[in-house]
Image: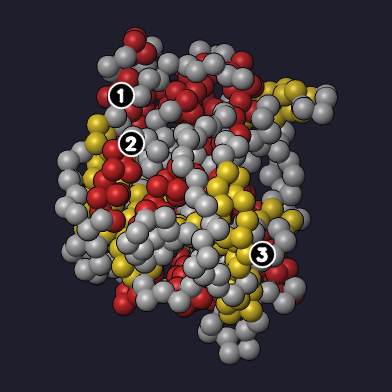
Amino acid sequence: MRFTNTLIAMFTLTTSSVVTADLNSEDLTLFKNEQKIEFKANSGETTDAIEGHLWVPENRNNPNSKKIRINYVRFPATGSNKGSPIVYLAGGPGGSGIATAKWRRFPLFQALREFGDVIALDQRGTGQSEQAASCVSSERLPLTTAINEAQITTRYRNAAAQCLTHWKSQGIDIYGYNTVQNALDINDLRQHLKAKKVSLWGISYGSHLALSAIKTMPAYLDKVIIASAEGLNQTVKLPYQTNKYFEKIQAVINKQPLKSQVQDLPALMTRVHKQLLRQPIKLSLSKKEGGTSTLLFQKHHMQMLASMMIADPNQYLAMLIHLYLGLDNGNTELLKQVLQRGIFDDEPITFKLMPLAMDIASGITAKRLQKIETQAQTALLGNKLNFPMPTLNLVDSKLDLGDEFRATVNSTIPTLLFTGSLDGRTYPEEQLEAVSGLSNLTQIIVNNAGHNLYTSSPEVLTRMQAFMKGKPVSSKAIELPLPILSLPEFK
C-alpha cells in the first residue's frame, strides 16, 4: 500500500556482470513442484535456476482453510560448503522477491550462492504467487475540486471496507493475510526444501517480516541480514522523524551550491504548503493518449508527492527540492512534467489484498497512534508518509494482530543490519528501537545512503559475505560520497 515504488519507472537502472552457474550436475536435487529454468535478469544476463511452488493454508487459524500457492525461484548453491538456504524477503508489503532478483540486486543474489541456495520468494498474495484480483471501489478523490483530510479519510475507509467485503464474498479468507501467517509460510518453505534451518535476507517490510519470523520460528533460523529495519510497531512512522530528516538534508544542501537558493528547506516546504492550502493551483496536464486533463493541485497532493520521493537521497529528492523552489517562485513547469506521468488521477480507489491487509493487520498501538496523530497536525508531511495508514487503522478490527505481535523482538540469532544515514522512510533512530532486543546484532551505518542501500557500495556485499562465513564483521561505518542535489535532467 505504501508509495515507495510509484516513481521507479522514471529512470533506467542497470546491473553489473556476474558469473552464472551450470545446473547440469547429476547430484542436483529437485524438490516437489520444481523444474529447471533459465532465469533472465532485466539487464539481459541469464543464469540457470529452478522455479518451484508449495501449497500453504490461506489461514492456519481456520481449520477449514483452503490452500494457496506460494511461488519462488531457487538459485542453487555454488560453494563447496553449502549452508542453510537464504530466503530473500521483499519490501512493500507487496513487493516480489522474484522481480527483485531480476532487478538491480541480481548480482547480490548470485554472489550469495557461495553460501547456500538463494531463494527469491514471492510472499503470499504477491508476484507469481496466487493472489486475489485487485478490488476497484466506488469511491474516488476528485481532481478538480478541493477536498479536506476528513473527506479523504472517509473515502479511503469506505473504499477499504468495500474491498474487504468484496474479497470475502469471493471466498477469500482475508484474515490469513498478515505478517504472522507470512512468517509461517517461511517455515513451510523450509520444510518443503528439507532444510534444518534457513537464513533470512530482507529489506524494509522484509525486515518487518524477518522480525516476525524470529518470534515465530526461532529454532529454525540460522542467520538474518536486514536493511532499513521496520519494527513490528513501526508500520506507521513518526511524523517528527520526517521533520528531522529534512533538517539532515539541509545539512547536505549547506555543503553545495544549492545553499544559495535553499537556506532553510523546512521553512521553504512550510511556505509552499501554506500557499497551496490558501490557494490550490489549477493545472492543465497533457495526457499520453492525447488531450489534456485538469488537476486542482492541493497541499495534500504536495505532501503525498514528497512522501513518494524521499526514500533515497538521489534524483527524486533533488527533483523534489526543485519542485518546492519552483512553486515558491510561482513556477509550475517542473511540477507539470512530473505530474504528467499520471501520479494522480480520478480513477476509483483501488486496493490489492496483500498490502492492504498486511498493513492493517500489523497496525499500531494506541499509544503510538496518539503520538502520531498529535505530531501529524504540525509535521511537514502530516500523516502521508505511510498513507493510507494510519487512516485505515482498525477498518476491520478482526484483522489487527494486537499489541503482543507489536512487542519488541528478543533474540540471540546472529543478525546483521545495514542502516542508511539518509534513509527517508525507516529512520535510523527508529531502526535502533526496532532491533533493541537483538543481543547478537551487528549494525553498520552507511553514511549518505538512503532506504535502498544494498547496491550502494561494494563494501555492503563484502560485509555480508564475512557475516555469512561466520567471520567477525566490522561495524565501522561505510562511507559514501555526499549526494548531489542539483536538478537532474528529466526525460
| Rendered-image quadrant of the C terminus | top right
Which is in the foreground here, disc 2 or disc 3? 2
Instruction: Name which residue type carries label 3.
Output: Gln
Q: Position of residue 417 (x, y in %)?
A: 28, 52
Q: Are marks 2 and 3 in contact (CB under 8 Å)?
A: no
Mark 1 neighbour class, 10 Å CA radius: few under 14, some 14 to 19, many 20 or more: some
Against 5, is 65 above or below?
A: below
Q: Secondary structure at mark 1?
A: loop
Mark 3 neighbour class, 10 Å CA radius: few under 14, some 14 to 19, many 20 or more: some
* Residue 372 in view (yes/no): no
Q: Is residue 237 left or right of residue 1?
A: left
Q: Which residue is mark 2?
A: 458
Of 40 and 270, the residue lying toward us: 40
The number of numbered discs placed on residues in the rendered structure image is 3
* Residue 80 in view (yes/no): yes
Of 119 and 359, the residue lying toward us: 119
Q: Residue furthest front?
A: 26
Q: Secondary structure at mark 3?
A: loop
Residue 344 figure quarter: top right
Q: Which residue is mark 1?
A: 482
Mark positioned earlier in the residue sequence (3 or 1): 3
Q: Which residue lies at the image location 43% right of the left edge and 28% below the top edge? A: 314
What scheme was used to colour the molecule? Answer: secondary structure
Q: Which residue is mark 3?
A: 131
